[in-house]
Amino acid sequence: MAILKFRIYFEEDDSIYRDVVIKHTQTFLQLHQVILKAYEFDSKHQATFYRSNDNWQRGREISLDKYEKTYKVEPLMMETTTIGSEIRDPNQKFMYTYDFVRNWGFLVELINVSKEENSKLDYPAVVKSEGIPPSQYGTKGLVGDKLTEIEEKYDLTKVTEGFNVKEQDGTDAAAEETSDEEAEEEGEEPAAEE
C-alpha cells in the first residue's frame, strides 16, 4: 500500500505549512478533514480541491458537495474519490479552498511516496507543523504554551555574538553595559559616560 506525504502550504505565506500522510486508498474527504484538523479550523463551511499543475492552475474539481454554481465539467465528489486515483505525476499538486466567503486557500503538494506504513500512526495523520496557523475567525491570541514556546525560540533579550551594537566611536555598547552591570553588582560606581 502506498503512503503519500503531502505538504499543505497556507497560500498567503508558504513558511506556514503542515505535512500530512495518507494512504492512497483513502478519500479526498479524509484529506479535507485532516487539513482542517492540522490548521485548527472547524468543518462548518464549503470546500473544494482542484487538480493542479506546476504553475498552480486549477484543473478538475473535487468537491465536498455539489454547489449552486456553474460547472464546466461535473465535479468529482470528495467522499467517493480516492487520493491515488488523482495522482498523475510524482510531484502532483492540488489547490484546496475552504469557506467560499473567507476564501481560505491552501497549496497541496505531494512530496513523498512510501511503501512502508507506520503502525503507530492512524492515517491520515499530521506529521509536521511549521509556523503559526492563521485564525479562522479573526485574530488569535497567543496564550500559555504557544507564547512560551515562541518566547524561548526567539529570545531577543540576549545579545548574541556578532550582533552587538557599536557606538559611533567604535566601542562595543553591549560590552560597556555588561561591565557597568558588573561594577554595580560589586558596589562600585559605573564608568562615567563621555
Image: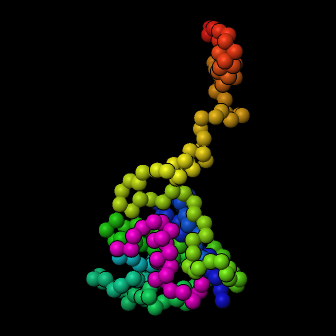
Direction from residue 89 to residue 144 in the image, left or right = left
* Residue visible at 51% across and 48% down in the picture: 147
> Which residue reaches farthest left?
68
* Residue visible at 66% across and 89% down in the picture: 1
> Residue 69 at what x, y percent from top left?
29, 81
* Residue visible at 34% across and 74% down in the picture: 44
Front position in the image: 170 or 121: 121
Q: Quadrant of the C terminus?
A: top right
> Residue 148 at what x, y percent from top left?
55, 47
Front position in the image: 186 or 132: 186
Quarter holding residue 15: bottom right
Quarter holding residue 18: bottom right
**Residue range highlighted in magenta:** 23-44
Quarter holding residue 151: top right
User: Is the residue 83 above or below the residue 46 in the image?
Assistant: below
Count of all numbered marks drawn on residues in the image? 0
User: Is the residue 14 above or below the residue 33 in the image?
Assistant: above
* Residue visible at 46% across and 77% down in the picture: 33
> Residue 52 at what x, y percent from top left?
51, 77
User: Is the residue 116 above or below the residue 135 in the image?
Assistant: below
Residue 191 lies within the magenta run: no
Q: Is residue 91 visible?
A: no
> Residue 160 at what x, y percent from top left?
68, 35
Residue 43 lies within the magenta run: yes
Q: How is the image coloured?
A: rainbow
Front position in the image: 162 or 75: 162
